[in-house]
Amino acid sequence: MNPARDFGPRIAHWFLPIPGKRDSKWQYFWVPVIGPAIGGIYGGLFYQALFEATPTLTFWIFSCFIIVLFGIALSKELKTATM
Protein backbone atom coordinates (compact mmCIF):
# COMPACT_ATOMS: atom_id res chain seq x y z
CA MET A 1 0.00 0.00 0.00
CA ASN A 2 1.82 3.01 -1.28
CA PRO A 3 -0.15 6.26 -0.99
CA ALA A 4 1.96 7.84 -3.72
CA ARG A 5 0.89 5.13 -6.16
CA ASP A 6 -2.74 5.27 -5.03
CA PHE A 7 -3.35 9.03 -4.95
CA GLY A 8 -2.27 9.95 -8.50
CA PRO A 9 -4.43 7.41 -10.34
CA ARG A 10 -7.36 8.20 -8.05
CA ILE A 11 -7.16 11.93 -8.92
CA ALA A 12 -6.78 11.12 -12.62
CA HIS A 13 -9.81 8.83 -12.50
CA TRP A 14 -11.85 11.48 -10.71
CA PHE A 15 -10.78 14.29 -13.05
CA LEU A 16 -10.69 12.70 -16.52
CA PRO A 17 -13.90 12.29 -18.51
CA ILE A 18 -13.86 8.52 -18.98
CA PRO A 19 -17.08 7.16 -20.50
CA GLY A 20 -18.92 4.75 -18.23
CA LYS A 21 -16.65 5.25 -15.25
CA ARG A 22 -17.83 4.58 -11.72
CA ASP A 23 -17.06 6.21 -8.38
CA SER A 24 -13.40 6.95 -7.55
CA LYS A 25 -13.92 5.33 -4.10
CA TRP A 26 -12.67 8.23 -2.00
CA GLN A 27 -13.98 6.56 1.15
CA TYR A 28 -11.08 4.08 0.79
CA PHE A 29 -8.32 6.70 0.38
CA TRP A 30 -7.46 6.86 4.08
CA VAL A 31 -6.39 3.18 4.17
CA PRO A 32 -3.03 3.54 2.29
CA VAL A 33 -2.23 6.70 4.27
CA ILE A 34 -3.27 5.86 7.83
CA GLY A 35 -2.90 2.05 7.72
CA PRO A 36 0.90 1.90 7.41
CA ALA A 37 1.31 4.57 10.10
CA ILE A 38 -0.84 2.64 12.56
CA GLY A 39 0.95 -0.60 11.63
CA GLY A 40 4.36 0.97 12.17
CA ILE A 41 3.46 2.33 15.58
CA TYR A 42 1.93 -0.97 16.63
CA GLY A 43 4.93 -2.90 15.26
CA GLY A 44 7.29 -0.80 17.39
CA LEU A 45 5.17 -1.26 20.50
CA PHE A 46 4.88 -5.00 19.84
CA TYR A 47 8.65 -5.32 19.38
CA GLN A 48 9.23 -3.43 22.62
CA ALA A 49 6.73 -5.60 24.51
CA LEU A 50 8.12 -8.83 23.07
CA PHE A 51 11.85 -8.29 23.49
CA GLU A 52 11.95 -6.12 26.57
CA ALA A 53 9.31 -8.31 28.23
CA THR A 54 7.60 -5.25 29.69
CA PRO A 55 4.37 -4.50 27.83
CA THR A 56 3.52 -0.91 28.63
CA LEU A 57 0.11 0.63 29.13
CA THR A 58 0.49 2.27 25.71
CA PHE A 59 0.87 -1.17 24.12
CA TRP A 60 -2.32 -2.47 25.73
CA ILE A 61 -4.32 0.64 24.86
CA PHE A 62 -3.12 0.52 21.26
CA SER A 63 -3.87 -3.22 21.10
CA CYS A 64 -7.45 -2.56 22.20
CA PHE A 65 -7.71 0.23 19.64
CA ILE A 66 -6.54 -2.11 16.86
CA ILE A 67 -9.03 -4.79 17.93
CA VAL A 68 -11.88 -2.27 17.90
CA LEU A 69 -10.87 -1.04 14.43
CA PHE A 70 -10.79 -4.58 13.09
CA GLY A 71 -14.19 -5.25 14.64
CA ILE A 72 -15.70 -2.16 13.01
CA ALA A 73 -14.18 -2.99 9.63
CA LEU A 74 -15.36 -6.59 9.85
CA SER A 75 -18.90 -5.61 10.79
CA LYS A 76 -19.10 -3.16 7.88
CA GLU A 77 -17.74 -5.81 5.51
CA LEU A 78 -20.28 -8.35 6.72
CA LYS A 79 -23.13 -5.84 6.30
CA THR A 80 -22.15 -5.11 2.69
CA ALA A 81 -21.68 -8.82 1.94
CA THR A 82 -25.19 -9.69 3.09
CA MET A 83 -26.88 -6.90 1.14
Image: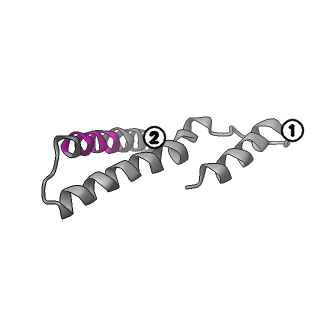
Residue 65 quadrant: top left
CB contact under 8 Å: marks 1 and 2: no
Write down the residue under mark 2.
80
Identity of the residue furthest to the front in this view: 52
Q: Residue at x 20, y 64 (%)?
A: 51
**Residue 29: image x %, image y %?**
58, 40
**Looking at the picture, which amino acid does disc 2 mark?**
Thr
- Tag 1: Cα neighbours inside 10 Å, few (<14), some, or many (≥20)? few
Looking at the figure, which quarter contains the N terminus?
bottom right
Q: Residue at x 78, y 43 (%)?
A: 12
Write down the residue under mark 1.
17
N-terminal label among 1 and 2: 1
**Looking at the picture, which amino acid does disc 1 mark?**
Pro
Q: Residue at x 40, y 46 (%)?
A: 38
Residue 15 quadrant: top right
Q: CA distance from mark 1 to mark 2?
A: 29 Å
In-image side of 16 versus 23 (left or right)? right
Q: Residue at x 38, y 42 (%)?
A: 73
> Is residue 65 one of those drawn in magenta?
yes
- Tag 2: Cα neighbours inside 10 Å, few (<14), some, or many (≥20)? few
Nearest the viewer among 30 and 37 is 37
Nearest the viewer among 53 and 28 is 53
Residue 80's place in the image compared with 55, above or below, is above
Nearest the viewer among 49 and 17 is 49
> Is residue 38 one of those drawn in magenta?
no
- The overriding secondary structure of the stretch rendered in magenta is helix
**Residue 22: image x %, image y %?**
72, 40
**Residue 30: image x %, image y %?**
53, 39
Identity of the residue furthest to the bottom in this view: 51
Q: How is the image coloured?
A: one colour
* First to last magenta residue range: 60-70
